[in-house]
Amino acid sequence: MKDLYTLLLQILFNVRNNLLAQKNLNLRMAKNKVFIISGRSGEGKTSLLLQVIKILTNKGLNIYGFYAEGKWEQNTRSGHCLVEIGGESRIELCTTNKTEGWQKEDRFYFNPNAIKIGNNIIEQASKTNAQLIIIDEIGPFELQGKIWAKQFSALLKSSKVPILITTKQKLINAVVTKFGITDFIEFPSNTSARVIVETLSEQLKA
C-alpha cells in the first residue's frame, strides 16, 4: 500500500512539473511572438510597414530595427536603401547595377557596408529597451543562410521582444520552418495599418 501511495505521489509530481514546464514554454513563446507582413514583390509591404511604424511611433512605442526603401527605374525595382528606424543610418543596400566589391546575389549587388550595419542593428536589438523589433525583409537570401539569416536566427533565440518582419507571401511556410517560428501572426499586405496596430497593441499588453 505504501509503495502504491509513493507511486501515485511520484506521478502527480511529474504531471505538475510537466504542466509548469509547458506554462513556462508558452510564456517564453508569447514574449517572442513574431508578426509577419506578407505579400507579393512590389505589392506594398514596406509602404504598409511605414504606416504602422508612423502610428506606433506617434503612440510613443519604442521601435528598433530597419526597413528597406525601394528604388525604381522605369517601373522596375532597381535596388533598396537600408534605413535605420529612429536612427541616423541610411545607406544604399543593393542595386541592379554592377558595382565593384559588392556581393552579387541573384540580380542584385549588395553593399557589404550596408549588410554590416544591418546585421549590427539586429545584433544590438535584444540589448535595447525596444518594445518592438522590425526587420524588412526576411526573404530568399535569408533562406539560403545569407544577408540577415545568422543574426535573425540568433535574435529569435535571445530576445523576448516581439518581432515584426516582412516577407513574400509565397515564402511564409519556408521562413517559419527554417527559423523555427511556431508562434506568429500573419498580416497580408492588403490589411489596414490600423488593424495591424490594434493587433500589435493588444499582443504587446498581453
Image (cartoon, grey):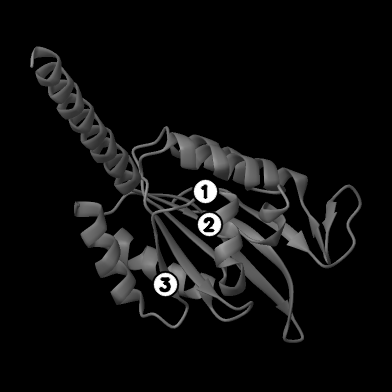
Q: Position of residue 83 (x, y in %)?
A: 56, 56
Which residue is farthest front? 1
Q: Which callout, 2 or 3, points to the residue nearer the camera?
A: 2
Q: Would you name the residue on which mark 3 appears?
A: 187
In front of the other: 188 or 77:
188
Q: Would you name the residue on which mark 1 appears?
A: 180
Category of crowding for the residue at label 1, using alpha-carbon neighbours closer than 10 angstroms: few (below 14), some (14–19), many (at least 20):
few
In front of the other: 115 or 43:
43
Q: In the displayed structure, does residue 170 sit left or right of residue 192?
A: right
Q: Are marks 2 and 3 in contact (CB under 8 Å)?
A: no
Q: Are marks 2 and 1 in contact (CB under 8 Å)?
A: yes
Category of crowding for the residue at label 2, using alpha-carbon neighbours closer than 10 angstroms: few (below 14), some (14–19), many (at least 20):
some
Q: Secondary structure at mark 1?
A: loop
Q: Is residue 130 visible?
A: yes
- The amino acid beneath tag 3 is Phe
Q: Residue at x 68, y 72 (%)?
A: 71
Tell me the quadrant of the picture where the N terminus can be found. Answer: top left
Q: Position of residue 177 (x, y in %)?
A: 56, 55
Q: Residue at x 32, y 39 (%)?
A: 25
Category of crowding for the residue at label 3, using alpha-carbon neighbours closer than 10 angstroms: few (below 14), some (14–19), many (at least 20):
many
In front of the other: 180 or 202:
180
Q: In the displayed structure, does residue 169 sit left or right of residue 128?
A: right
Q: Would you name the residue on which mark 2 appears?
A: 176
**As drawn, 61 above or below 68:** above
**Marks 1/3: CA distance?**
19 Å
- The disc at residue 196 is none
